[in-house]
Image (cartoon, helix red, strand yellow):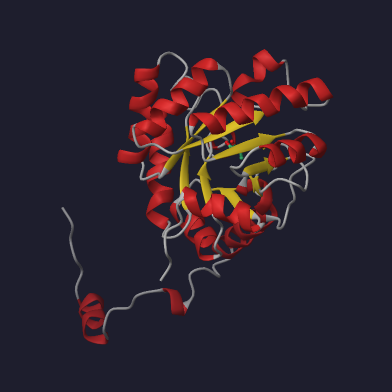
């Protein structure tokens, strides 16, 4: 029996120097396999907009769409902390709407926490209110895909001393606001290491080097399933795209050549019923 993890366990892992493992998942069976392998955090990432729904960026995915995936993932998980990713537009307009949407992740989506991109006074205040209202928050700074257009592209963040200083301030403010962890995306590892040392809550790196408290990747990158683009920092552990193509190819060959289904893959009538079929002609009107 698995004991479900809470954000407190993750903070403990950081203190003990045990690396935290995190992956995204978008469906029930994948989430179940990741959970059986004791991945600590399963993020229902808004990356699903691109890898599961085929949008060009993460901006288009809606709250209602995210909830369908969050429900599916939560049904497959017993141990990991399931985190719902607040999609673009679900928290930017005002705090009331943001809190309502975050609560939907917990209430309808089965998540145990939400992730929010960005920093600044509004985000700090929102994080504080969410935590006060029972919603644990995982923050996300560095390269934040929802800010793609204001960041001016897929750019590495925190490349200088001044930028690192600013990011430390952001991370400290998020910790003070009550966030239980901070995702650091696409920052140089020296910057990520310094932030990790300066705060008490764990940092979860994606493209941010070796010294974060844990690592997260998009599951489709790990499985080799999303082949439109492979980020430099992602490691591909399998070729699922190739495997799916090979399966589809072989299935098609088997159907076309009468090799599927075989004797073992069919249902048969008993001989008496078959005899009746032979003897009579059934008219269908
Ligand atoms: O949406 C996502 O997948 C993310 C990453 C941190 C993996 O935000």
Q: Is residue 78 visible?
A: yes
> Residue 108, position in %: x, y?
31, 39
> Residue 153, position in %: x, y?
73, 20
Q: Is residue 143 above or below residue 110?
A: above
Q: Residue furthest bottom?
A: 271
Q: Which of the image's four quarters has the N terminus?
A: bottom left
Whether residue 86 sits left or right of residue 210 in the image: it is: left
Quarter-of-image position of residue 184: top right
Q: Is residue 127 above or below residue 89?
A: below
Q: Is residue 155 visible?
A: no
> Residue 8, position in %: x, y?
48, 50
Quarter-of-image position of residue 264: bottom left
Q: Nearer the viewer, residue 243 or 229?
A: 229
Q: Residue furthest left?
A: 285
- Residue at 28% x, 79% y is 269
> Residue 135, position in %: x, y?
39, 36
- Residue at 27% x, 86% y is 271
- Residue at 26% x, 77% y is 278
Q: Nearer the viewer, residue 72 or 11?
A: 11
Quarter-of-image position of residue 156: top right
Q: Is residue 97 above or below residue 18?
A: above
The quadrant of the picture showing ligand 1 is top right
- Residue at 56% x, 65% y is 37
């Amino acid at each position: 029996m698995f004991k479900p993890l809470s954000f407190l366990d993750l903070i403990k892992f950081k203190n003990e120097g045990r690396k935290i493992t995190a992956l995204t998942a978008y469906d029930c069976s994948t989430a179940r396999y990741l959970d059986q392998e004791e991945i600590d955090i399963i993020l229902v990432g808004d990356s699903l907009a691109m890898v599961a729904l085929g949008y060009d960026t993460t901006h288009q995915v809606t709250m209602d769409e995210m909830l369908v995936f969050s429900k599916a993932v939560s049904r497959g998980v017993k141990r990991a902390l399931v985190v719902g990713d607040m999609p673009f537009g679900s928290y930017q307009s005002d705090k009331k709407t943001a809190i309502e949407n975050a609560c939907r992740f917990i209430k309808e989506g089965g998540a145990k926490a939400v992730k929010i991109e960005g920093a600044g006074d509004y985000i700090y205040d929102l994080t504080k209110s969410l935590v006060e209202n029972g919603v644990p928050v995982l923050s996300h700074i560095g390269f934040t895909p929802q800010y793609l257009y204001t960041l001016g592209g897929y750019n590495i963040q925190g490349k200088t001393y001044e930028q690192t200083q600013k990011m430390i301030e952001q991370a400290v403010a998020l910790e003070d606001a009550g966030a239980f962890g901070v995702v650091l995306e696409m920052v140089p590892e020296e910057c990520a290491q310094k932030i990790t040392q300066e705060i008490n809550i764990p940092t979860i790196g994606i493209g941010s080097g070796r010294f974060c408290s844990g690592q997260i990747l998009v599951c489709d990158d790990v499985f080799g399933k999303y082949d439109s683009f492979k980020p430099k920092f992602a490691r591909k552990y399998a070729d699922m795209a190739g495997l799916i193509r090979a399966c589809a190819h072989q299935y098609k060959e088997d159907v076309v050549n009468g090799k599927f289904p075989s004797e073992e893959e069919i249902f048969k009538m008993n001989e008496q019923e078959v005899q009746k079929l032979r003897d009579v002609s059934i008219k269908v009107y």
